[in-house]
Image (tube, rainbow, N blue to C red):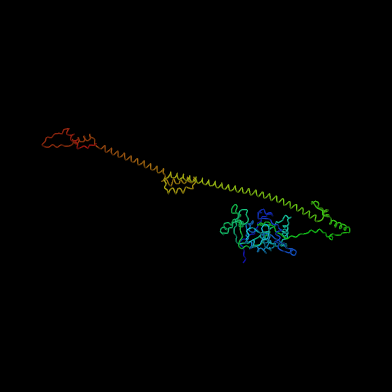
Amino acid sequence: MKKQTKFLSTFANIKIRPVVSEEKDKYLSVASLEKLKKFLPDINTEDNIDLLPVAFDACVVNRVNKNGDVIDGETAAKITKNFVNKPINVEHNRNQVIGCILSASFSKFGSNESLSSEEVASMKQPFNITLGGVIWKVVNKELADQIEESNDPTSNNYMSISASWELGFNEYNIVVLDENEKNIENGKFITDEKEIEKMESSLRSFGGSGKISNNKYVYRQVLGKVVPLGVGLTLNPAADVQGVAVKTEEKALDIQENKSSIEMLNENNISQEADLNVKLERIYMKITKIEEITDSLLSQVTASSVVDFIAEEIKKVSDQFVTEKAEKDNAVKAATEKYEAAFAEQEVLKKQLAEVNEKLSAIQAEQESKAKQEAFTLRMAALDEEFELSDEDRQVLAADIKDLDEEAFSAYKNKMSVLMKEKNKAAKKAAQDKMDKEKEQEMKASTISEEVKASEEVAQVPTTQEVVEQAVDNGTKASVEIPNSAPASEPTVQEKYAKAFSLDGFEFRK
């Protein structure tokens, strides 16, 4: 059954960068290729002319790379030997394998002094994994030539090619570092699985920015079963490594001429041949400018003179290049510092603006809250003034109107005027006034009726005259029986009034 690792990292990116890193810090010092040559595998290149021995730093342990990955010293001590016999390819393209790794070692970061496995297992500071191998010239002769050229200090391609490793692994922790910090000895390690799950979306390997705040960055620490998969030669290594060293040999310039190569066309040429030998024995002549090199001059000077002139010209160009590069680097550095200062100032302004906006939002929210409360209070007061409300009514109305705007509240109030008309104070007062008025009118009418009745009763009481006249009438009509023994005689007027107005017949009122 074929085993596969869960994660794969090539520890490189595709952006082509300058040969000399602009991110050098106190830990980084570009090592001379000469210091790497002691790690070259022992190959007899005379018998194996198709092989090009190489040595290079594959990575820096305990120091994060540009892809956001890192391994510690303990892991490096365990896995480094497994780089042996793994392929060397071009830019991590496994279809372009051009060599093989033959040796694996450790060296100090910045100086390439050898380190043992025992020393690095407990080291917290950065150090290199340094590998040696061979490039198969017959596979890609042009690339082999380019690697050799990158070892030539006079070449524009000097140290332009570096190595970048590939790993397979199943586990990882997260390391949190401050901005511009690369060494994990100064970081905070996140080992809890739940915390790792929360933060892993910020990792560059998962498509994140690598940042969790303005000055905090996150990196993946490779752990567990780690399998070295090989090395890719690249123009832009992810780690702080640089250069691939090769075995070089001094090539002496042979200035002897083979006279047998000169064709003897006739006897006249013999003198020319003698002249040529004389010219080869002439004293050394110094060439000062390229215009001096002519066919005539070349027939008089030694080859070493031309070589010296070319070497001097190359040195001049190289010195000029170094000077111009230093000026450009200084200009870039100044521009970078200016940009970083402007960026920092912009960040401060952004932060201040955010604080102002936050305070303004708080003030606006407070004002809106006060305005809303005042509007609510006025609305409830208006409803209380218009309607007779119970506590239950007020709770329902408050819930309905608390979030209404003016237009919606106006419509709601009109609706309540219809639904609660029986509780309208003005309507109820008008109805009560009407009832009071009607009652008052009824009371007045009742009083008048009683007065009329009393008046009628008073009118029915006979006056003194009426009593007298009635009495007279009654007295007139009364028959007076005269005893048979007494003579009949008629009563006098005085007797009539005396009988009619007897005291027993009157009721006195005080």
Pick the front one: 277 or 354: 277
Indicate left or right for 477 with 342 as reference: left
Image location of residue 417, percent across then percent down: 44, 45
Total label count?
Answer: 0
Seen in the picture, residue 311 relative to 383 is either above or below; the reply is below
| Viewer-proximal residue among 364 and 351 | 351
Left or right, 110 with respect to 254, comes to: left
| Residue farthest to the bottom, as pictured | 1
Quadrant for the C terminus in the image: top left
Indicate the position of residue 466 as horizontal and vertical percent values.
23, 35
Report the front residue among 368 and 26. Answer: 26
Residue 13, percent from left and from top: 65, 56
Q: Residue furthest top?
A: 493
Residue 230 vs residue 59, the one in the foreground:
59
Which residue in the rendered view is the most extreme toward the front?
119
Picture coordinates of residue 10 (x, y %)?
65, 59
Query: Does residue 447 lie above or below 139 as drawn?
Result: above
Quarter of the N terminus within the rendering: bottom right
Q: Please tell me in which quadrant of the rendered image residue 73 appears.
A: bottom right
- Report the residue that reaches farthest toward the left: 485
